[in-house]
Amino acid sequence: MISEDVRREALREFTVAYRCQRAGELGQAIFHYRRSIELIPTAEAYTFLGWAYSFQGRLDEAIVECRKAIDLDPSLGNPYNDIGAYLIELGRPEDALAWLARALKATRYENYSYPYYNLGRAHELLGHREEAHTRYQNSIDEDPAFTPALLALKKIRDLPSDAPED
């Protein structure tokens, strides 16, 4: 049984980590996420630790942390989406597709606009223009103010109609 004091301390460490990350203090953020995980491992802490690693360009390590998050709580959508995004950044958009599809099926996710947007990115990189258009539109349907999807959709629409599609 985990004491209430340990729970509070883990949450405090996580909160400090998030504040450090937002301030660009990635080393401190990583320290505090790890401390939170030592106290109580959570899918959120592993996911956010991976996110901090990604800001340092440590994408392979970020993926490892997201996999730990999934092992703890397969219902959380964020780590699936994040793995997909990291794979896109690694130049592996085809590998990203399955992870992003899993993010869309996750029952615990607050904003599905992200995996739809990342699916659009992956399909655009693969030359699947119509599918990319559809996924960007799905993202906007989820969050009409999601600027990255709005810009990506505009870019796709502005391409010449005779642009090649795979």
Image (cartoon, helix red, strand yellow):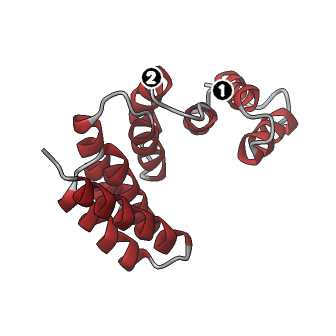
Q: Which residue is mark 1?
A: 135
Could you say which is closer to the camera, residue 53 or residue 163?
Answer: 53
Residue that badge 2 annotates: 107
Give the quadrant of the C terminus. top right
Would you say 139 lies left or right of 157 here? left
Residue 127 x %, y %: 61, 32
- Is residue 133 placed above or below 30 in the rendered structure? above
Q: Quadrant of the N terminus?
A: top left
What's under tag 2, amino acid-wise? Answer: Thr
* Residue 81 drawn at (x, y percent): 46, 38
- Depth check: 132 or 159 in front? 132
Considering every residue shown, the one lying at the far left of the view is: 1
The amino acid at mark 1 is Arg
Q: Which mark is residue 70?
A: none
x and y, in percent, of residue 141 in the image = 75, 26
Q: CA distance from mark 1 to mark 2?
A: 19 Å
Q: Are marks 1 and 2 in contact (CB under 8 Å)?
A: no
Q: Secondary structure at mark 1?
A: helix
Secondary structure under tag 2 reads loop
Q: In this rendering, is residue 128 above or below 29?
A: above
> In terms of depth relative to the viewer, which is nearer, 57 or 44?
44
Q: Identify the image quadrant of residue 31.
A: bottom left
At 48% from the left and 52% from the top, the residue drawn is: 89
Residue beneath the point at 75% across and 32% down? 140
Residue located at (46% from left, 24% from top):
101
Image quadrant assignment for residue 118: top right
